[in-house]
Image (cartoon, grey):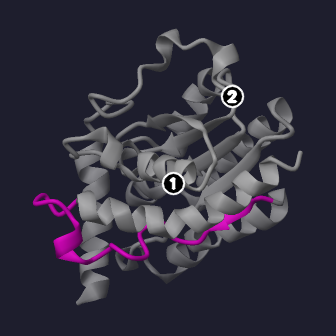
Amino acid sequence: MKTFLLCLFLITIGCSDSGNTESTLPNSEDTSNLNIESMEPRIIFFGDSLTAGFGLDDYETSWPHLIQNRLAKAGHSFHITNAGVSGDTTSGGMGRIEWVLSQKPTIFVLELGANDMLRGIPPAVTKKNLQAMIQKVQSEHPNCQILLIGMQATPNMGKSYRAEFNSIYPDLAKEAGISLVPFLLEKVAGIRSLNQKDGIHPTKEGHVLLADTVYPYMLKLVEKSKKR
C-alpha cells in the first residue's frame, strides 16, 4: 500500500505542477531588487514545487526557510533565496540558472528531476542537465558548496527506467565530489496525513520532516564553508 501511495504521490506532483509557473511562494522574498553585495553568505534553494512550498499559507513554513531558522538558532546566519518553480524540469532549470547564480551563493541546493521522471524524459537527459548545472556552479563559484537532493522513480516507470533514474543522483554526487541527500521525500511520501488535501504536496508538518531530512547535510556544508 505504501508503495502504491508513493507512486500516486509522485505522479500527482508532476500533473499538478505542469501549469503553474510561480517561481516562489506569494509572500516569499522578491529577489529582483536585491543588493548583490549585501547578500553573502547566501544559500540558494533551486528546485520545483517541493522547494517552493506549493500550497502553504506561510512561506516561512516551507523546508528551506525552516532550515534557515534552524541554522540561525545554531549560530549560523544566512540569507536564502527560495528559487523553487512549480512544475520545473531540469531543462527548465538550465534556462534560469544563470540569473540565480548572479546572487553569488555560498551554498547551492539543487532539487530537480522529479518532473523529468514523471514525464518520461530519458534519465540520460536528466543526468546531463543536472551535471551541466553542477559544473556551472563549480565553474562560476569554485568555493560554493553544493548539496544535491535525490529523488526516486515511481514503480510504474518499469524496472529498467527506475534503475537508471535512481542511479543518477548517487552517481553525480560521486563524480562531482558533492554532498547528496538520497531521497527528499523519505519521511513523507505515501503518508496521507503529511500531505495536503490534494494528495500532492507536503503539509506544514510534512515540511518539518523535509527539513529534518535535509538539515544534517546542510549543517555539515555550513561548517565546511566557514573553513574556506
User: Which residue is drawn at the image coordinates 30% and 74% (left, top)?
Assistant: 7
Residue 90 seen in the figure = yes
| Residue that numbered label 2 is attached to | 40
Secondary structure of the residue carrying tag 1 is loop
Q: Is residue 136 magenta?
A: no
For the C terminus, the image quarter is top right
Query: Which quarter of the picture shows residue 147?
Result: bottom right
| Residue that numbered label 1 is attached to | 113
Q: Position of residue 180 (x, y in %)?
A: 66, 65
User: Which residue is drawn at the image coordinates 31% and 40% (left, top)?
Assistant: 59
In the figure, is residue 140 to the left or right of 158?
right
Q: Nearer the viewer, mark 2 or mark 1?
A: 2
Secondary structure of the residue carrying tag 2 is loop
Q: Considering depth in this image, is 124 or 81 the residue closer to the camera?
A: 81
Q: Is residue 191 magenta?
A: yes
For the N terminus, the image quarter is bottom left
